């Protein structure tokens, strides 16, 4: 039984089929990338795994449990954490307090939450900014904050939503490195991405989506050479390297 | 209980509904465009009613004629309030949509000031206009409809019609409609959103002022009237759908009819309580109201 | 330049952690002052004003818990009424001492508050406010028009309930001197503020701040927002109901118009907002500023100049909203910081190390 199993999942919005008959699995400890052209259904699938909204049919099984119909907070205590594509920091709180909010999930009191938050800050080399306000920090730092907050909930599966967006190349390299480090601590990563270079260098396995369905599912080399995947992106700027 | 009684109650309800609609349309417009729930609407209503009353008392101007004076006067008043009191909150928030608390509390404070200003200067006694039309009735078969009430009923439609023309046939109207639908996009199109807010608020207040001038022939004026009628207009607006003008029209009429016919079967205060219950039910289960333009 | 203090530390009465020593000293000093005032102030009327200050500080702090959950309630007076009516009816019909009756009232208030607020929580901003007004009005109208309620409970409609006079009877919460009420009100205020403070520093406080700031982000971090909003509401309702019992025992009368009306709800909300919305000490500060003003205005300006006091009240609200968006908190904080510049550095540094 896989760590995360998505079985035959469908989602319509009005008359639009966003995701249809989608299957995928993620093994414990993997770094899996989910890519595809705009409108492929990646975000919809992502949101369904994160339980932001439920699929119309199908199952999402996490560690043997069907999580369809659960609320995001329930799924979070089971061990699935997510970041948001457009970052949502708590603007009127400090970085430390932001992370403490995440820390309170596993920490039983403020001292515990603080300890967890400080650990995460250390891990992400973020300690220097701990007293900065949520609205004061840069975009790159906001992304780090999203990550830090989610990590504070001690997830076993971390869902990343276009976490590279808005970063310059140097920042992206740092983030890839950071994500690898996080993964080496035992956290499984599933990331939706547009940035090809990042995905190719970070992910062990890549799933390509198009028009709500799965095109390719395999290691980066195989995906890069796949005719269908390239065709799906024709007309876009993205070229598989 | 005869058919005639029920029909009579129905017609009275229609007239009452017209009154409710007339006082609520402005509120709906203001919310639809500015997204502010104007707790001071009742206060404006009351002050407009007083203005009309004093014009009658000192200058012998018939309330129906005073519409011409009260309307523009209260446009300026409304515009000024929005411009000087509410707009700064938007600017401070650096947003085109304001957090609910600020503007809400401000309008609550404003209503307090208005009601007590009136209390202080005019005293708490009721004042009534003696209208030449007070006893004129219109006959429809066995029905006798009081003209003054019918006038208000008409007024609701006139206000609605006027607004319709304004919103659909003028540049200002188009600006108002676009801001109401999507303020960011409107701003990007070069529309001065803040000025549109000012105008919309002004228009919303004119609507309620016209309603006030129209109903003083049969409703006595007092400082407390703003509160009572104000609450009614909130129920109407939620019923019809916040932001929808036809909704306010329909909602008002429905409320009027339900109250009137309802009072045949159930004592007055129970009906009043039930209108609140209806209010809550709509808020909880269909916040979009009948016309479903805007929801929560 | 005002330093934007974090929302969470702001909640600790606006005093941030490193500065806690001075802040706590000041608060402690003021509290000590309150403790000894009855020894110097003898006039019953002056004591009455203090009692009202503590009473509204209590109510404002209780109300504040709901605004910490991000909702604006303009119907809290209904809970006041529930508490007051419950304890008074229990006393009138069954002779149950209001000391216990008020606890029952608090439970009833908490339950009803929770039941009413639960469906309304998904409403944003103004919609929730409107719903709270509607609920309060429904309750008030019902009581106002009902002589005999369900189970034969005498509600006495608009006349309200008169607490049977027993003279000086501490066992049934009746005193003939103001001093007793003074200390009770002071205690209640202290309890409310302490509860609020403890909540703010705990998981619940952080979670409420998160929900206020961005509910979706909070939920993604494991926060059951409905549960926490409900907790805040229940605690707030229970405390407010407690206040209602005090009201009944202090004024010896409780009626729908004064105790359950929209005006009372607005007074409570105003006190809560003026001193600094969503901060722990804000309502207390707000009450210290507003209550004596309104009491004195009512005393000197009431009657012939009816309405003047409320007019000034309304003007105050407008001015605060326009110029002091965070209530009196901002200018007060600036003052405190300026004072702190004179505190020896060693003290502050020592506290910083113990973080």
Image (tube, coloured by chain):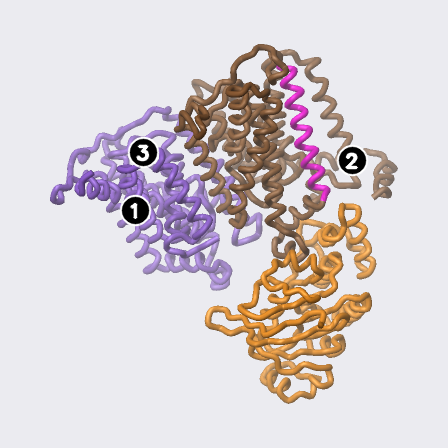
Q: Is residue C251 visible?
A: yes
User: In what element is the residue under mark 1?
Assistant: helix
Chain that appears purple: B
Q: Are marks 2 and 3 in contact (CB under 8 Å)?
A: no
**Closer to us: mark 2 or mark 1?**
1
User: Which label is found at residue B253?
Assistant: 1
- Chain C palette colour: brown
Dominant SS of magenta comes to helix
How far apart marks 2 and 3 lie (CA) works out to 64 Å
Which callout, 2 or 3, points to the residue nearer the camera? 3
The answer to whether one can see residue C274 in this image is: no
Q: Position of residue B93 (x, y in %)?
A: 57, 49
Q: Which residues are magenta?
A: C178-202
Q: Position of residue C135 (x, y in %)?
A: 47, 38
Residue C189 falls inside the magenta stretch: yes
Nearest the eye: B270 or A39: B270
- Disc 2 marks which residue? C340
Q: Which chain is orange?
A: A
Could you tell me if the residues under marks 2 and 1 are in contact, i.e. CB atoms within 8 Å? no
Above or below residue B232? Residue A90 is below
- Residue named by callout 3: B267
């Amino acid at each position: 039984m896989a760590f995360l199993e998505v079985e035959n999942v469908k989602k319509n919005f009005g008359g639009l089929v966003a995701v249809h008959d989608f299957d995928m699995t993620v093994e414990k400890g993997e770094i899996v990338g989910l890519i595809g052209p705009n409108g492929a259904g990646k975000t919809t699938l992502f949101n369904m795994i994160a339980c932001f909204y439920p699929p119309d049919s199908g199952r999402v099984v996490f560690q043997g449990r069907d999580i369809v119909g659960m609320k995001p907070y329930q799924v979070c205590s089971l061990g699935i954490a997510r970041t948001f594509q457009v970052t949502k920091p708590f603007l009127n709180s400090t970085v430390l307090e932001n992370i403490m909010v995440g820390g309170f999930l596993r920490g039983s009191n403020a001292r515990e939450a603080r300890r967890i938050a400080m650990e995460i800050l250390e891990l992400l080399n973020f300690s220097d900014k701990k007293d900065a306000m949520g609205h004061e920090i840069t975009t790159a730092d906001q992304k780090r904050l999203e990550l830090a907050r989610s990590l504070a909930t001690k997830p076993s599966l971390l869902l990343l939503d276009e976490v590279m967006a808005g970063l310059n190349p140097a920042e992206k390299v740092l983030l890839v490195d950071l994500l690898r480090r996080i993964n080496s601590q035992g956290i499984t990563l599933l990331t939706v991405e547009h940035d090809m270079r990042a995905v190719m260098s970070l992910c062990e396995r890549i799933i390509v989506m198009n028009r709500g369905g799965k095109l390719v599912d395999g290691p980066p080399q195989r995906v890069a050479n796949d005719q269908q995947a390239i065709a799906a992106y024709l007309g876009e700027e993205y070229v598989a390297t | 209980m005869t058919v005639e009684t029920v029909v009579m109650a129905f017609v009275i309800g229609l007239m009452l509904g017209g009154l409710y609609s007339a006082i609520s349309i402005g509120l709906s417009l203001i919310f639809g465009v500015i997204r502010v729930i104007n707790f001071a609407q009742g206060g404006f209503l009351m002050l407009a009613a007083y203005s009309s009353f004093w014009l009658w008392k000192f200058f012998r101007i018939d309330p129906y004629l005073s519409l011409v004076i009260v309307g523009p006067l209260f446009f300026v008043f409304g515009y000024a309030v929005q411009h000087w009191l509410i707009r700064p909150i938007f600017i401070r928030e650096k947003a085109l949509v304001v957090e609910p608390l600020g503007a809400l509390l401000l309008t609550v404070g404003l209503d307090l000031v208005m009601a007590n200003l009136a209390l202080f200067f005019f005293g708490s006694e009721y004042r009534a206009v003696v209208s030449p039309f007070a006893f004129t009735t219109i006959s429809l078969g066995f029905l006798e409809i009081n003209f003054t009430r019918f006038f208000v009923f008409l007024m609701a439609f006139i206000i609605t019609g006027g607004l319709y023309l304004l919103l659909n046939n003028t540049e200002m109207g188009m600006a108002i409609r676009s801001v109401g639908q999507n303020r960011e996009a409107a701003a990007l199109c070069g529309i001065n959103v803040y000025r549109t807010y000012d105008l919309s608020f002004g228009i919303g207040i004119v609507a309620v002022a016209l309603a006030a001038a129209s109903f003083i022939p049969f409703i006595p004026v007092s400082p407390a009237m703003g509160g009572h009628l104000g609450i009614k207009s909130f129920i109407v607006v939620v019923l019809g759908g916040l932001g929808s003008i036809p909704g306010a029209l329909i909602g008002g009429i429905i409320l009027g009819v339900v109250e009137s016919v309802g009072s045949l079967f159930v004592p007055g205060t129970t009906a009043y309580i039930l209108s609140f219950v209806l209010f809550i039910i709509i808020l909880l289960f269909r916040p979009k109201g009948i016309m479903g333009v805007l929801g929560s | 330049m005002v330093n934007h203090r974090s929302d969470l530390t702001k909640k600790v009465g606006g005093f941030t952690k490193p500065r806690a020593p001075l802040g706590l000293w000041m608060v402690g000093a003021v509290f000590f002052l309150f403790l000894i005032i009855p020894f110097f102030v003898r006039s019953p009327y002056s004591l009455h004003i203090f009692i009202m200050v503590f009473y509204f500080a209590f109510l404002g702090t209780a109300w504040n818990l709901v605004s910490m959950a991000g909702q604006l309630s303009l119907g809290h007076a209904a809970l006041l009424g529930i508490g007051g009516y419950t304890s008074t009816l229990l006393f009138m019909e069954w002779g149950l001492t209001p000391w216990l009756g008020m606890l029952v009232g608090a439970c009833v208030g908490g339950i009803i508050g929770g039941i009413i607020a639960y469906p309304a929580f998904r409403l944003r901003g103004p919609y929730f406010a409107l719903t709270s007004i509607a609920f309060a009005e429904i309750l008030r109208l019902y009581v106002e028009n009902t002589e005999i309620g369900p189970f034969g409970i005498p509600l006495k409609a608009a006349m309200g309930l008169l607490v049977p006079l027993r003279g000086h009877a501490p066992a049934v919460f009746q005193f003939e001197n103001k001093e007793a009420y003074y200390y009770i009100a002071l205690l209640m205020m202290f309890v409310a503020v302490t509860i609020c403070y403890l909540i703010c520093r705990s998981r619940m406080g952080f979670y409420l701040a998160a929900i206020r700031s961005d509910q979706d982000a909070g939920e993604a971090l494991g926060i059951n927002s409905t549960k926490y909003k409900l907790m805040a509401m229940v605690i707030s309702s229970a405390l407010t109901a407690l206040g209602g019992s005090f009201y009944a025992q202090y004024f010896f009368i409780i009626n729908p118009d004064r105790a359950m009306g929209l005006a009372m709800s607005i007074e409570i909300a105003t006190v809560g907002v003026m001193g600094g919305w969503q901060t722990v000490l804000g309502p207390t500060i707000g009450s210290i500023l507003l209550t004596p003003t309104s009491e004195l205005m009512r005393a000197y300006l009431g009657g012939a100049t009816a309405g003047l006091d409320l007019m000034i009240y309304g003007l105050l609200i407008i001015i605060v909203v326009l110029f002091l968006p965070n209530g009196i908190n901002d200018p007060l904080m600036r003052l405190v910081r300026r004072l702190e510049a004179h505190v020896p550095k060693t003290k502050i540094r020592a506290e910083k190390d113990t973080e």
